[in-house]
Amino acid sequence: MDEKVVKVASRLCMIKDLGVSGNLFGGNMMAWLDEVAAIFAIQVTGEENMVTVHYSDMTFKQPVKERDIVDFYCGKVRRGTTSVTFEIMARCEEKTVFCADAVFVALDRNGMKKKIDWAEPFNTTK
């Protein structure tokens, strides 16, 4: 397991992202997370076609408000034969607002699971 945790992206919470309670709508957070996780999965594996398989219990720890900047971090990578599992965390002003484990699998051109070539070192700058 690679314990390295890296910042992958940031998002600004705007009025259009809010739910009726004035907090970031959970569905918007989940869409942001899935996009960030996909980016990370592609970067860390070097594979072009990575798809979401599973998220662990999604825990929303703190509300996100309009004008908050949400920073997304991924790491603690666990390598599988055809998949990668890692932690994804969203932080706002040094507070963790969300965390979960994500599992992505590599697919070939026919949509079938594909073995990941882990010969390349962990690299999130590709």
Image (tube, grey):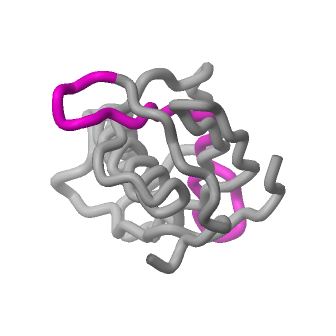
Image position of 10 (left or right of 17): right
Residue depicted at 60% across the width and 60% down the height: 73
Residue 74 in magenta stretch: no
Is 54 drawn above or below residue 100 in the view shown?
Answer: above
Residue depicted at 21% across the width and 58% down the height: 15
Q: Is residue 33 visible?
A: yes
Count of picture labels = 0
Image position of 49 (left or right of 117): left
User: Which quarter of the figure is the C terminus placed in?
Assistant: bottom left
Q: Which residues, given as a range, are shown in magenta?
A: 90-112
Q: Position of residue 44 (x, y in %)?
A: 54, 59
Query: Which quadrant holds residue 49?
Result: top left
Query: Which quadrant holds residue 92?
Result: bottom right
Residue depicted at 40% across the width and 32% down the height: 114
Residue depicted at 57% across the width and 54% down the height: 90
Q: Nearer the viewer, residue 107 or 42?
A: 107
Q: Nearer the viewer, residue 98 or 3?
A: 3
Q: Position of residue 56 (x, y in %)?
A: 60, 22
Residue 91 in magenta stretch: yes
Q: Main secondary structure of the magenta part?
A: strand
Query: Which quadrant holds residue 14?
Result: bottom left
Q: Nearer the viewer, residue 113 or 22?
A: 113
